[in-house]
């Protein structure tokens, strides 16, 4: 049984074609936040999928460029869609006139027609603009070529989606839980929409292949919110990075350089949390231990676990500080 709905599959499938142009950014040799939070096996499966669909890029690139995704726009002119066959039938029924109206609604300032003037206003590459000119002129033929490959590509997508669901079931379920929480709104959506709108959108989807994307689509007839499987982690990492900026890297390194404080961090990491035990281990008074613990808490290097109420080491903050050192010195992490 699938972990996500077919609606999630369809939306993720249509969004996944943009990866044909984005995947190069993953492979430029520079470590990104996504590299730090995304399992390598997950990345490899996404790369394999993109490699497979790239074989059909000559046809796909007529509808999807680095500047726009017409396959996604087709969804917005159709009635409620729950199955992929609904989407295919909808694309088949789009007339030349409806297609031009769709372009006008999305890209024209006045929304009354999409002209060469409107095209010239777009901050797109020359190749994207030329593609759209050709697509307008040869819409029927190009749509026919597209419809001949989409069912095969959707089947391919399903195979990779099911592999991800099998290997990363817990991760996907965690993303589903995050999507509906108040913390998710505060962390991800707060800067983009008000809380009332967030609560009223019924379709809240988890994206498997586009695991790094946030999707906010409030237009009728398909208002929906979507987050990729790794989006929550991405925003948390960004938040941690902001915290690292506040608690300077140099300060963290100074704390780690102090023999007593470093030792206390080590023993807390091994499970020792009793003031009396720590005092005995380092030959300092209990009040001295309390002072040191408060200092480490104030600097976010240790924190209390929500469940056990015991001190734990803030691994993420220390890892971020050490990675920042490696990056500053151009030392590769792999």
Image (cartoon, grey):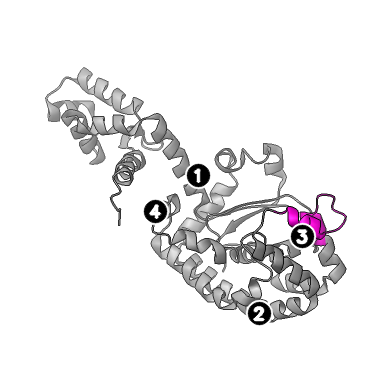
Q: Mark 1 points at which residue?
A: 235
Residue 296 image point, x, y percent: 30, 28
Disc 1 and disc 2 in contact, CB within 8 angstroms: no
Q: Distance between the residues labelled 2 and 4?
A: 35 Å
Residue 66 seen: yes
Say whether disc 1 or disc 4 marks the residue closer to the N-terminus: 4
Q: Which residue is drawn at 66% across and 79% down?
A: 149
Residue 231 image point, x, y percent: 52, 50
User: On the rendered image, what quadrant is the N terminus found in?
Assistant: bottom right
Q: Which of 9 and 279 is in front in this view?
A: 9
Q: Residue 23 carries which label?
A: none
Disc 3 and disc 2 in contact, CB within 8 angstroms: no
Q: Which of 30 and 122 is in front in this view?
A: 122
| Magenta region | 102-122
User: On the rendered image, what quadrant is the C terminus found in?
Assistant: bottom left
Answer with the quarter of the image where residue 9 lies.
bottom right
Helix, strand or loop status at disc 4:
loop
Q: Which mark is residue 31?
A: 4
Q: Residue at x 86, y 58 (%)?
A: 113
On screen, residue 267 above or below 209: above
Residue 12 image point, x, y percent: 61, 63
Residue 159 belongs to the span the image colors magenta: no
Helix, strand or loop status at disc 1:
helix
Residue 310 seen: no
Say whether disc 3 or disc 4 marks the residue closer to the N-terminus: 4
Given this view, does label 1 or label 2 mark the residue nearer the observer?
2
Q: Distance between the residues labelled 3 and 4?
A: 36 Å
Q: Distance between the residues labelled 3 and 2?
A: 21 Å
Q: Mark 3 points at which residue?
A: 76
Say whether disc 3 or disc 2 marks the residue closer to the N-terminus: 3
């Amino acid at each position: 049984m699938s972990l996500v709905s077919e609606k999630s599959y369809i939306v993720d499938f249509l969004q996944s074609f943009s990866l044909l142009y984005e995947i190069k950014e993953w492979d430029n040799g520079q470590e990104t936040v996504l590299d730090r939070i995304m399992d390598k096996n997950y990345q490899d499966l996404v790369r394999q999928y993109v490699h497979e669909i790239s074989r059909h890029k000559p046809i796909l690139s007529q509808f999807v460029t680095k500047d726009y995704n017409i396959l996604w726009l087709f969804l917005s002119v159709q009635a409620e869609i729950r199955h992929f066959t609904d989407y295919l039938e909808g694309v088949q029924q789009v007339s030349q006139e409806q297609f031009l109206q769709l372009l006008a609604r999305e890209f024209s300032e006045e929304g009354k027609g999409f002209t060469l003037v409107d095209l010239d206003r777009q901050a797109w590459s020359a190749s994207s603009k030329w593609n759209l000119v050709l697509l307008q002129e040869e819409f029927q033929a190009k749509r026919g070529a597209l419809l001949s490959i989409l069912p095969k590509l959707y089947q391919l997508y399903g195979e990779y989606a099911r592999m991800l669901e099998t290997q990363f079931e817990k991760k996907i379920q965690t993303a589903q839980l995050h999507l509906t929480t108040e913390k998710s709104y505060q962390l991800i959506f707060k800067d983009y929409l008000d809380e009332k709108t967030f609560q009223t959108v019924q379709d809240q989807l988890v994206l498997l292949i586009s695991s790094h994307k946030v999707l906010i689509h409030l237009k009728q007839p398909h208002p929906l919110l979507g987050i990729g499987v790794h989006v929550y982690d991405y925003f948390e990492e960004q938040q941690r990075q902001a915290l690292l900026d506040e608690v300077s890297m140099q300060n963290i390194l100074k704390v780690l350089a102090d023999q007593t404080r470093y030792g206390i961090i080590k023993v807390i990491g091994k499970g020792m949390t009793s003031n009396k035990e720590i005092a005995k281990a380092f030959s300092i008074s209990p009040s001295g231990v309390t002072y040191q613990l408060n200092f480490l808490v104030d600097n976010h290097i240790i924190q209390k676990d929500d469940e056990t109420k015991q001190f734990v080491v803030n691994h993420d903050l220390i890892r971020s500080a050490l990675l920042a050192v490696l990056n500053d010195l151009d030392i590769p992490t792999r």
